[in-house]
Amino acid sequence: MIRSVVRGIGSALPRRIMKNTDFEGVVETSDEWIVQRTGIRQRHIAADDETTASLGEAAARAALDNAGLTPADLDLIVLATSTPNNTFPATAVDIQQRLGMRHGFAFDMQAVCSGFVYAVTAADLYLRGGQAKRVLVIGSETFSRILDWNDRSTCVLFGDGAGAIVMEAGEGAGTIADRGVLAASLRSDGTHKEKLYVDGGPSTTGTVGHLRMEGREVFKHAVGMITDVIEATYAQAGITSADLDWFVPHQANKRIIDASARKLGIAEEKVVVTVDRHGNTSAASVPLALAVAVADGRIKKGDLVLLEAMGGGFTWGAVLLRW
Ligand code: UT7
């Protein structure tokens, strides 16, 4: 059977690092509060010349280099983002143009923080359905542009960045020993839409708007939703937490990551954590964390890796793959 195998990975971060102490004098907060409640110590913030498209392009080029491929080898680009350069055209098409690619097709996928997990799942279906042989999947965000910098309950939480992988159709035996995507589960529930949203849009206010979040409410639902969708993914593949080599969760809050891992019985040393240095980069958080763990040699070919995310909508989901 066809399996969607990861061939390469890359990432890109804005030049500027903003530390927790840099918020002092901006809003009433402290390094101590931010670290204790979230685990975040710093985040990268895009300059005017750094956009979702430019960061996505840089991550894409790094992933292609890592795979030993060029844009000519791609059939499809899927970009997960909630902070596109323009309302339209899709920023994926902008990145396609930046890469000098005039064949194939490209589109954006909007599932907020779950965007990358959704995009990997979609790419897997295009590959297994024979519509594409190689897909570039990118998560790129510039959340700094939609933050209310006077709202201390949200502006300290988010950062900018991009991560990308190249996925390729390969032959598998149909067992969990195969490399590639082995199982995936996606969920959404719009009854929670007012707990985490942006208060503007083309069809309502005609403005871009700012991020609004009832943090405590999101937190309350997060662990249960994450663990449910992971258990559904385990059931599809017939595995348990003991079989995992690495858990690469969405990086919103260290307390949510720890509580989810604890509830699932995933050992602490198998959990990849980058929220301390990146903050919450929404759809970019999972590929950025993956890129860190691949670059430092933790994630190796053949390892069983679980990706998970949860965000606005609510949307949530998990992907199990063998690297
Ligand atoms: O990626 C999408 C998913 N998003 C998330 O997963 C975010 C989920 N939520 C969270 O991570 C947490 O709820 C937060 C980090 C947002 C907040 O942590 P919390 O422990 O739930 O704190 P809280 O909202 O209950 O606020 C506690 C106190 C409040 O003061 P009072 O009402 O107790 O007097 C807040 O006003 O902390 C105050 N507070 C702050 N204090 C200093 C809120 N933000 C700040 C701040 N600095 N930046």
Image (spheres, helix red, strand yellow):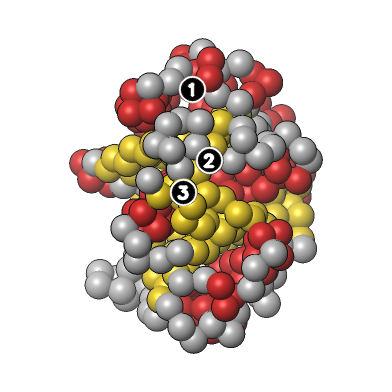
- Residue 239 appears in view: yes
Q: Is residue 276 above or below residue 131?
A: above
Percent position of residue 129, x then y: 31, 58
Instruction: State the SS at label 3.
Output: strand
Q: Are marks 3 and 1 in contact (CB under 8 Å)?
A: no
Q: Which residue is mark 1?
A: 260
Q: Quadrant of the N terminus?
A: top left
Q: Are marks 2 and 3 in contact (CB under 8 Å)?
A: no
Q: Who is closer to the viewer here, 98 or 75?
A: 75
Instruction: State left or right for residue 49 relative to residue 238.
Output: right
Q: Who is closer to the viewer here, 63 or 195?
A: 63
- Label 1: few (<14), some or many (≥20) within 10 Å? many
Q: Earlier in the sequence, mark 3 or mark 1?
A: 3
Gap in angstroms between the C-alphas marked 3 and 1: 33 Å
Percent position of residue 45, x then y: 67, 59
Q: Amino acid at mark 2?
A: Arg
Instruction: State left or right for residue 106 relative to residue 245.
Output: left
Q: Is residue 129 above or below residue 153?
A: below
Q: Which residue is mark 2?
A: 179
- Give the residue at x 67% y 77%: 49
Q: Is residue 137 above or below residue 264?
A: below
Gap in angstroms between the C-alphas marked 2 and 3: 9 Å
Gap in angstroms between the C-alphas marked 2 and 1: 26 Å
Instruction: State left or right for residue 103 relative to residue 322.
Output: left
Percent position of residue 94, x then y: 50, 80
- Give the residue at x 39% y 70%: 107
